[in-house]
Amino acid sequence: MNLRRTSFLVGAMLLAGLALTVLGVCVGSTGFENLVGPLLNPQQDPAQFAMARQIVWEIRLPRTLGAWAAGALLGLAGAVAQGLFRNPLADPYLLGSASGAALGVALALAAMGGGAGMLGDNMMNGGEAVNLFSGSILVRLGLTGGAFVGAVLAVLLTLILSRGVQQTLRLLLAGVVVGVVLGAMTEIVLLLSRDTLQAMRAFVLGSTTFVDWTACLLMAGVWMVCVVVAWLLGRVLDGLSLGDATARSLGLPLGPMRSALVAVLALATGTAVAHTGLIAFVGLAAPHLVRSVIKTTHGRLMLLSSLVGGVLLMVADTLARWLIAPQELPVGVLTAVLGGGYLLLLMNRNTRSARGARL
Amino acid sequence: MTAATNSIAIRADSIRARLGNAEILHDISLSLPKGRWTSIVGPNGAGKSTLLKVLANLLPHTGTVDLLGRPLQQMPGRDRARQLAWLGQNESAGDDLMVQDVVMLGRLPHQPWLAPPSEADHAAVARALQATQAWEWRGRALGQLSGGERQRVLLARALAVEADVLLMDEPLANLDPPHQADWLALVQALVAEGKTVVSVLHEISMALHADEMVIMRQGRVMHQGACDAVTTHRALEVVFDKRIAIHGLGDQWVALPKANPH
């Protein structure tokens, strides 16, 4: 019964992803009606055709699929974090990766001076100012690299402070400390280099504007590796959910397996953050959405959360481009509003059921 | 190997264990007989649960523990897990797992890495769920069960390992009297099959149903002996500061609290 339900959910999420891909290609500052004509009749106006092709193939398709990949990475990381920390309110950014990535981006922006200000301008133009987009490849490489290196270094710092992965509470506290300290350092960098504020804001709010095919493929590749490793380690999380001692009594080598899970968490989060900024709540909400529909093992939970995360971010991204078109909302704002509302609902439900249990 | 070592399931020698800076177990040596049920009792803070964890190699300690004649610390984790099942106190969380998935975790030590559960695994899970009368909840989430129902599922999880030695820490928590009686029958059946059961119990009357009793106080073993021996009963009364008295009732022993110790 559970297997049938899981298969149904996987199928539904893949179909939704496909439908949203088509929708994502259609929605944007240039309406669909202006793209269909030139694409169907290339001979009529070659210039129009080239532009339409560029918008669809080089901008909208990669960013739409990129939104799926980033959401899938965050959904997976969220399920891993919640299983690893045995806490349903854990999110992928717990180990300091978010603040590390933010500091990396702030430093990269400061190093590149005002040139990176383009990030902010482009955001507000709906992400389709092609010249600005292609002209800032070096800037983007610097930002993506800065974010990724920052995220990975922050997780390593957390691991050093917590002296390994054995004690979950220590790991969690170290993550909080690293988050606060790196956050403060980011503020100092921004204070010293005021030009970077605007671009930094775009990063903190999250955006899929800059996802090109390279980024898309990279995220998809990392996603595949992470999903396979997570699937293999699903049973470890099942065992861990009954407590460390029980898991160890079952002969599970917890140390290496926890390290592998932390690596998945760091890699998935770092890759997503590097390409799309700090998108809030997808990682937190996706596993909860899955759990509200089906109670299942961690292997399936992680896979489903990943698929749900992808669809969630695609929905948010499409809405972000459509709500105030031709202007565009930063997608992180939408996920924060939607996810925050959902979290509130969840807390309400938890409080009510806890009260019910006490009575 | 001598006949004496053949009849020992667990032998512990010079065990010391710490929690933080405090030493909880002070130089404990004991042998637990094979094919018997031994209960470990003692006042709160005596170190009973800590000792049980050490015997399962779940806590850092000094000294040696042999399981069925082999040094526990040198056994590969999966080997140990197949021979020794452990049921912890207040195993928490796992609320989102289905009952049958929880019990199937007990089969992990028997499954090759990545292999799906075999027919034998499914059969063992079914046996364990039926033995604890939890079969009908197999399709429900653990979080939807009451405390006692949950305890029976967790007991089934430990039974599903089908190990020769079973260590249980407060297995009667949350069980109502009829299910406590069922648990007694279950343990007696396991022992009849030749399995070794070691349980930490705070209810002395239940613990007195065992074959052997280990009585602890302040991190030391004060007495070990047969549950029906008068010396064991006297030792119990001493360890509990003469605040309890052991009485015979039909064919069993009961421990009753004494209002006035003198």
Image: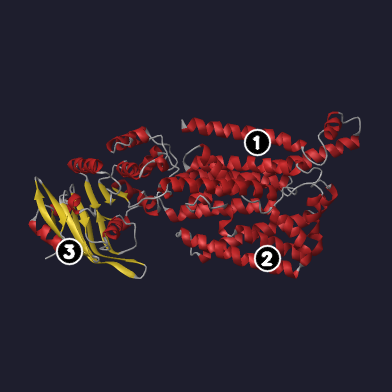
Asked which secondary structure carries label 1, the reply is: helix
User: Along the horizontal axis of the image, is A140 left or right of A307?
Assistant: right
Cβ atoms under marks 3 and 2 closer than 8 Å: no
Q: Chain of mark 2?
A: A
Q: Residue at x 29, y 49 (%)?
A: B173
Measuring from the top left, give residue A358's x and y in whole percent: 41, 48
Q: CA distance from mark 3 to mark 1?
A: 67 Å
Q: CA distance from mark 1 to mark 2?
A: 36 Å
Q: Is residue B78 visible?
A: yes
Asked which secondary structure carries label 2, the reply is: helix
Q: Looking at the picture, which amino acid does disc 2 mark?
A: Thr
Q: Residues within 10 Å of mark 3 (few under 14, many from 20)?
A: many
Q: Which residue is mark 1?
A: A17
Q: Residue at x 86, y 38 (%)?
A: A50
Q: Looking at the picture, which amino acid does disc 1 mark?
A: Gly
Asked which secondary structure carries label 3, the reply is: helix
Q: Nearer the viewer, mark 3 or mark 1?
A: 3
Q: Which residue is mark 3?
A: B239
Residue A49 to residue A239: above or below: above
Q: Residue at x 83, y 53 (%)?
A: A135
Q: CA distance from mark 3 to mark 2?
A: 61 Å
- The front one of A296 and A112 is A296
Q: Which residue is mark 2?
A: A186
- The front one of A138 and B210 is B210
- Please count the marks in the image: 3
* Pointers 3 and 2 within a single chain: no
Measuring from the top left, give residue A359's x and y in whole percent: 40, 46
User: Along the horizontal axis of the image, is B173 left or right of A149?
Assistant: left
Measuring from the top left, give residue A57's x and y in whole percent: 78, 39
